[in-house]
Each structure stands twice: as C-alpha cells, then as structure tokens.
Amino acid sequence: MTSDNTPVLTIRDYSLAYRVPAGKIEVLKGIDLTVHRGEIVGLVGESGSGKSSLASAIMRYLPGNAEENAGEIRLGETDLRAQSQRAMADIRGRRISMVFQDPATSLNPTLRLGEQLAEVLIRHQGLSKDQAWREGEARLAHVGLKTPAEMMRRFPHEVSGGEKQRVVITTAFACNPELIIFDEPTTALDVITARQILDLFGALQAETGVASLYISHDLALLSQTARRVAVLEKGTIVEEGETAALFRAPAHPYTRALIDAVPHPEKPLVEAPVGTTAPPLVRIRDVSVHYGRKGLLDTLLRRDFQRVAGNRSITLDIQPGEVLGIVGESGSGKSTLAKAMTGLNAFEGLIEFDGRPLRGLSDMNRSYRRDVQIIFQHPDASLNPRQKISEILARPIKLYGNKDAGTTRDRIVAMLERVRLPASTIDRYPHQLSGGEKQRIAIARAFLSNPRLVICDEITSALDVSVQASVIELLMELHRETGATYVFITHDINLVRQIAHRIAVMYRGDLIEVAPASAIADPDRKPYTRELLAAVTPPASTQRAQPTLS
Amino acid sequence: MSASYILKRIALIFYTLVVVSLLVFAITQILPADAAVMMLGENATADALEALRQQMGLNDPIWLQYLHWAGGVLQGDFGTSLRTGQPVGPALFSALGTSLTLAAFALVFMLLLAIPMGIIAAVRRGKFADLSVSFISYIGVSLPEFVTATLAVVLVADWWKLLPPAGYVPLTQDFWGGLERLILPVIVVSVMMIAHVSRMVRSELVDVMHTDYIRAARLKGLTPRRVLFRHGLRNALLPTITIVALDVGYLLGGVIVVEEIFSIPGIGRSLMSAIQARDLPVIQAGVMIMATTYAVVNFIADVTYAWLDKRIQYD
Amino acid sequence: MTDFLRRLFRTPQGLLGCLIVGLILLAVVAGSWVTPYGPNDMQALARYKAPSAAHWLGTDQYGRDILSRLLDGARSTVVMAVLATFIGTLGGAILGTGSAYLGGRADEFIMRTVDAVMAIPSLLLALLVVSLLGSNSANALLAIAIAFVPSMARISRSVALTVRKQDYVSAAVARGEGAAYIVLREMLPNVIAPIVVEMTIRVSFAVMLFATLSFLGLGAQPPASDWGLMVSEARQFLHRSYWILLWPSAAIALTAIGFNLLGDGLRDALNPRT
C-alpha cells in the first residue's frame, strides 16, 4: 500500500501522440503531475488541450494508434505502464475509478441501476449477488437517495440526471479506491443539480480521503474545489500551483487569459440601463406554447389528452436598446420562447413588435423577419455544411434588399471585417472554420439585415472560455454600434449578470420574475431565483488581485 | 410497454391488410382476364357467359365486388379457384404450412450463423476474421436465389450426389427424408439474409462498443467477457430483432423463387402458377396471406422489442 | 471533387467498387463495338464449346458466343437496373420528402400506407405488376421501379426529417425564406448524399431482381441476351456444358458486388466524421 509520503498518482515526463495517416499528432508533452492522498488536484484546459487523453493514459485505456514516450505513470508503488490489460482490469474500479461527464450516456440504458452498481462489488470485492445488492442499497442511502431499494431496481431513463450521477459517483467510490478521476462531472447537469453533486463530492472526499484528479474547463468551479490546479494548454502543463496563489498571481500569460475570460457579475460590460420612458419594443402578452398532438387512437377512445406545455402564459416587455437576459435550466422553456418569437413554434397569445400586433406565424411578414434575428447555440448546425460562406452571408442581403451602397460581396467583406474575420473567409466552407469563427459567421449573418432585435440562444455554451469571452466582446461592441436590442438566453448566470440590463428567470415553462441585473442577487427575490443564485459558483475567488488605482 | 401501444400496433395490422387488399383487388381487377371465359372455356356461348357473370357478381359495381370479396375473406372464404374449381382457402393454407416450415428452418439456420458471424467480426474488427465475414457477406448479398439454387443443385445434387435435387416430403410423413430435401432450399433462401444480418449485427455491435457506457463498464474493471455479453450484446442485438422482422418480407420473396426451383408445393409456387394462369382468386388470397404473415411477424417483433427495451413507451 | 475522389479511393470498398463498376460501365458503353461475334450469331458446328482462343468464354447451346452475349446483355441488364432504381428512387424520394415536409396527419397517413405496401414482398409486387402489364423488359423495369418506391420513401423521409430539424433550416425559416429556397437550396443538397448512397446499393438489388424476373419468365423474352434469361435457359443444358450457366451467373454477382462496394465506399467518403 501507499505510504504517507508516496504520492497516490505520480506522472513523470509523460508524452503521448496519436499516429494518423498525415503523420503524428502530439497530444501530451512532458507531463509532470502528482496527486497525494486526501488531495484534490484540478486539471484545467480547453477543448483539445489533451485533458481527456491524460485521463485515458492514467486508466491505460488508449486507442491502438497511441504512441507513448518513456515517461512514467505510477499509482502508489505500482507502475501502471507495466501492467497487462488483464492486470489493469483488476486495478480499474478497485484502485482507480472514474466519474464521467454525462451520466445519461455513461450508464447502460438497458440494465438496472442496481446491477450497474453491484457488478463492481461482485467483481472486485468478491461479494455474492445478494450481498452486493444489499451493499449497493446501503451505499445509495448514504449518498442521499431517499428510496435506495427502489432506485436499485430502476432503469437509467426512469430517474433524473442528478440521481443518475449520484449512482455513478457511488459506483466510483464503491471499492474505496486510492484515486478517482472526475472528468467534468457536472458539465452536463443543471446549475442547482450540479451544486448538489459538488456538495456530495466534497462530503465523500472528506470522508474517504481519496486522492482526486478533477478535470474541468470551469476555472471558477476549480477555484472552489481543488487545492492545487494544473493548467493544460495544447498538451503542456504551463502552470501549476496552490489554487489561491495561482489565481492571485498567475505567472503564465495563458493562465492570465483564462482567468480574465471568466465572466464577473461585478464587472458589467454594458452601459447603464436605458431610460424606460420609451414605449417597449416588444410586448409579450400571455404567450403560451404547447407541444404534442392528439392521436387518432385517443380520439377514438375518447381519452383525455394532455399537451406538453413549453411556455405557460408568458407576459414580458422588452425595452428598445436593452439587453434582456433569460436564464433557467434545461426544459425551462427559454428556447421555446425564442422560437415562438421567431416564428419557429406556433404560439397562443399576443406578441406586439414596435406597436404592431402579431397573433400567429402568418402575421410575421418580411419586415418583421428582417427586424428580428436569431443566433443559435451550435454554429455547426446553424450553418449549412454544403454552402460557402459567400452564399450563407448573401442570403440576408438578397432577402432584405440593399440599402447601403456597394455590391453584395463588398458588404459581406465589410461585415466579415466587423466580426474580425479575414476577407478570405468568404470562399470557405463552414467545416474549414473553427467553432468560434463559425459563431462569428452566424453573428455576421444576423447583423447583415440591420436587425432591431437579436435573439441569442445559448450562443456561447458550445464554445471554450477564451473564445466565449471574445464572442461576447464582439456582441457588446455590435450592441454599442447598432443599438440593437438583445435577448440573451443562457444558463450561465455569471455571464448574464455581466452583460444584461435585466434578467428574466424561467422555470418549467413559467416566467418566475424579471429583475434588474444589479438587483438579481437581492435577498427579496423569489425563492427559485435565490436557489438558482446560491447554486452558482461565485467567481469572486478567481478574482485576480487588481492594482488599486482609484 | 403500455396496452395502448399494443392496441395501436394491432390497429396498424388491420390498416395494412385493408391497404393490401385494396391494392391487390385493384391490380386483379385491371388484369386482362375474364373469369367467366376462364371457367367455361373459349367456346362458351355469350348467353352462358353472361349468366355466369351474373351469378358470380361480375357485373356488379367494383366497390360492391370488393365488399363481397372482403366480406368473404373475413369469414375465411377466399372464393373458388378459376382453374381447379376448388375452394382457394384450404389448398392455400396447406401450402402456407409447407412454406412456413421452410421459412422457419431458414430463419433459425440464418440466426444461428449470422449472429455469431457478426459478433466475431465486430470483436476482431479489422482482423482476418472480420475481413472473411465481410468478404462472405459481399458475395452473399450479391447472389440472387436462383443463381445460388442452380449452383447448389449442380454441385451438391448433380455432381456429388449428396442430396436429392428437388422435391418435397412433409416432415410428418417421413421426417428424415423430408429434412434431407429441405437442406438445400433452406441454405439457398438464407444466404442473402445471413449476409445482411451478420453485417447488421457487426455494425450495431461496433457502434455499441464505442459508446460511453461501454467505456464506463471497461473502466470499472469488468471482465471483457462481461462487458461484451452483459453490456454490449444486449444493446446490439435489440435493433436486430426489427431488422430480421423486416427481412422476413425478403425471405417470403425468396421463398417464391426457391419453391419454384426445388418444386416445393408451398404458397410461393401456388402464387407463381396462379399468376401465370391468371387465376385471380388464388392471386388475391395468396398475396393477402403473405402480407398477413409479414404484418404479424413485424407486430411480434415490435412488441418484443418494446418489451425488452424499456425505453420505448409508445411509438 | 478531387478531394471527394481521394476519400472514395482511400477505402478498399470504394476503390474496388469504382473499379468494378467502371469496368461494367465500359462494357455497357463499348460492349457492342468490341464483341467478336453478334450476340445472336449461331454457329451450328461450335455448340457447347469450353472457353478457347476463338471463344474466350465458350459458346452456348446454339453455338452463340457467350462473351458477345454477355457484353450485349450488359446493356439491357445494367442500364435497365440503373434506370429502374433511378425511377424508383426518384418516386420514393419525392413521396418521402414530401411526406416529411407536410408533417402531421398527412405524414402519418402516407407513411402508414407505405408501411402497409411494404407488407407485400418486393419480388411479389414486381411479379404482380409485370403480370398486370405483360411480360417484357420495359414492364419489368417499371415493376422494379414501383417495388422500390416504398422502401426508398421510408429512407428519404427519415433523412429529410433529420435535415428538417437542423438549425440551418430553422435559421432559413426564421429569416423568412420561401419554401422553394428552403427545400431546394438548404435541404436538398444535404438530403441527396445519403439517398445517392442508398440508390447505388439498390442498383445491385435491381440487377438481381431483374435477373430473377427474367429467370421466372416474366422479364426479358428469348432470344434476348439478358443475363437472368441466359441462366434460366442454361439450366436445361447443364449436362452438356456448365460454362453457359457459370458466366452469366458470375456477371450478375460481379455487378451486384461492384455496386454494393461502391455504395459502401460512397457512404464512408460522404461521411464528414471520417
């Protein structure tokens, strides 16, 4: 076993590359990392930084085209690289275990939760089926599941995301491993659930003293959970240190950029709210959206049919020139509202735009379509893969006419410049661009029609922190230049507090309340809003020590 | 799985049969054949023909003829054969028994071969075993039944004299003799399905083995055997149920050719001779019986699937 | 385009499929010019000949040169199969995408009916159509096209529905594009690729179905050099020469394999993930 001064996990000068037809891709270069007993080490990096490859390397679960150098990976005294796959199978789940990002995909959909938990106990602790099942029930009770016996018999699709992740965590802790690797365990969860899972993790960690390697892209979250943090950029650990010290005085420019990119509600990026004397640009009155259609069989059997409500009687005003944030967890109906406003969903009720009433899709004429633009979450999906950028960006110009001077191509090039993309982008296909570049194209497409209202539906969620920051910066710049009104839909509360004048909170199809961004954290907010805000990891601890000037 | 799902699926069977019956009736109505002429011969007098037409209801409006016929079918009366003058139902149902014996043997034979082939190919992906299965599959899906049948008869029956070239003996009469005569037809009719299903099993299993939950199972330290059989196979074979059921349509088509070549008195052969003789009631009944078989098999497959895969609640 | 071909040739299926299909198309186009004999030239003194320098693939029961007949038959068999598949695919694609576009009850009605028609085995459906229209090649073509419509409609619909849900289509709807632009410019280019893959694989089915119809006496009629008919006729003369049977069978199998391989190669080449 591990003596007290031997680290649980030791990685020395480890490099990894993948062989591909075009040559070799280096994913990890000279990694040095240790994790001691009772310690939580955070590993932060953006997509493509190699953080998941490192987890795979530790688990000895690498694809066939992996090529490693002579570096060292040790678990206690055990040289993991010297282990056969059979020996590793004995170590996995017993001495090292792993918690994955999305509990919805990491649990087998056709096996009962109990079996997926008990099988680890049977495999590694030699328990009989009955013993393992009883032990499983006891463990589930321990992680705060109220009806453990019932939970054991359920299938993954019958329980909530948070419950699933509790089962996954219980499985990881089941054999009292020496090391647990957490691979973004809360990223796929809603804010409040994520907070509960984090609290559970903290409690179990303190109780068992297990060494943890916590992989995340979320700096704010790591600043709260990890004692030490290693920053991974393009396969290299550029900086490592005690969390507090690292955030206070980051040495490496990349770390600094990452910390600066984290949204801070205390540093608003918009100017003071506009006066409310002007009449609202949009009035939403009792707008409801329902999904589902009564089936023929239901009609025949005279059965009651319950339609699923996406929005329930939403009433909301949007002031000209303001940035209205809409927050809520998945399924709260925030995207549904955006779709209703852009004519992608049928709705009931009344939307008034600039004094003109709209009662249905047929009332949305060309000038409304021009005035109201929507930008989607996934730029991969919102740009047609078989059209060149020139064709994608020419559409709004062709559709809404050319008020400005210049040819279509000139206008496109000018717009590309405004979203800070080189003019050569015009002849490319979407798949030749990066995620951030694609989102800039989507933004350009929206602004080419000189819109008065731009609806941004989670447009930064699929992007890395640093890319997100630059896209937000661009959006705010366009806001100042054009004076367009924004509806900014997001689940990132820190971000929305930074960029919105007012924030609307939604929950399961209902609008809970609308409050000024500056007053969203007030104690007299509605209970759900308070719960939501309490669940958010405060970014305050990531605040760099600012030289006090004023 | 809810009762309403089963109810809905049963309603679909009836809808299928209504559509098929309308289609078949329409096709047989346009067929250039005069039932009265067929029964009485070319030399019958105009009066006699007219009288028979009157008696058979051939002068009624088409929709009335359809209702008459459909009403009969619902009571199990498929009319009388124009060629033999015998009732269509009993003869066809005994032929159906023969065809179903052939089809059932073929299905079992196919599954016994195709599933292991698919699993081995998926597990040994890119290795020799996988390439061999791939190679066999490509050949298999590219040989129409009449070619395989002809080659099989030439090789096995004519040259090597291992098995009888054709003919059929009911298993109840002479089990071993009947079985011996079934071997070649069963192999021939399964070749295409073996190729198709083994490829499906392979690709499903390859997909499943790349999922997050399989990675999670491996990283829990489970034995490769448990990961494959308990976690992988179950999920990979579920969709195969539906694919096999859809292939039954293809199997029934193959049965027509194989029965023709091996002189097996099944429903396919009855249909072929009825089509050649334009024996309308037999064609109508034969197509209805085939469609019903297909619809029922798919119903069973869908319900089984829904029962095994708890996620499917309704369509 | 060159990029696409490189991707296609990268997989063994794509390379081999292109090669075989290319050879077959060459035979279709140039076959009648290079044949050493006329497809129906009978030589009474050279019947049932095994392959030789004079007759590369031997001769049949009437002393006709098998190679010449195969090359001649390639035109009818392959061209007919491709045409039938194309017509069937077009019909199915229009029905399937139309159904997906309409949505709601119309969609449900159309697809349930298509499912119902699929309960009739496609060979049987083709047999019925041929017996309705009369036995000849043109009617066999139509019969196969009709038999392909239901399954192609199913596939097209599911592809169209997937594309319909994409955000770029939503974006087009939201900015007020007309239905024609959305269907033709946004959806069609993305729907076509998977349908072309499916169509290529279908050609091999059509070749086999065609041959089967001819074999059963319901497709091409003697003395046509249709491959299925050649197999059917050869069966009676097996005891004299098995070459008569072997070559057309091999030709059918090779064509089917070629289109199958090409289809799989195209699928891989068109898949952006690989």
Image (tube, coloured by chain):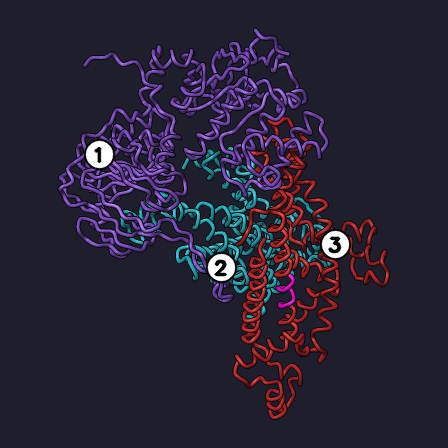
Front-most of residues A312 and A414: A312
Chain letter of the residue beneath label 2 in the structure image: C
Magenta residues span B287-293
Q: Which amino acid does label 1 sit on?
A: Met
- Determine the CA span between mark 1 and mark 2: 45 Å
Mark 2, secondary structure of its residue: helix
What's the colour of chain B in the image? red
In reply to whether residue A505 is colored magenta, the answer given is no
What's the colour of chain A in the image? purple
Mark number, residue B289: none
Left or right: residue A206 compared with residue B243 = left
Quarter of image, res B255: bottom right
Q: Do labels 1 and 3 share a chain?
A: no
Left or right: residue A151 compared with residue C7 = right
Front-most of residues C61 and A167: A167
Q: Which residue is drawn at 49% across and 12% down?
A: A33
Mark 3, secondary structure of its residue: helix
- Quarter occupied by the C terminus of chain A: top left
Q: Position of residue B84 (x, y in %)?
A: 72, 78
Front-most of residues A48 and A344: A344
Prevailing secondary structure of the magenta residues: helix
Q: Residue at x 29, y 39 (%)?
A: A504
Mark number, residue A415: 1
**Which residue was labeled with disc 2?**
C111
Q: Position of residue A114 (x, y in %)?
A: 62, 36
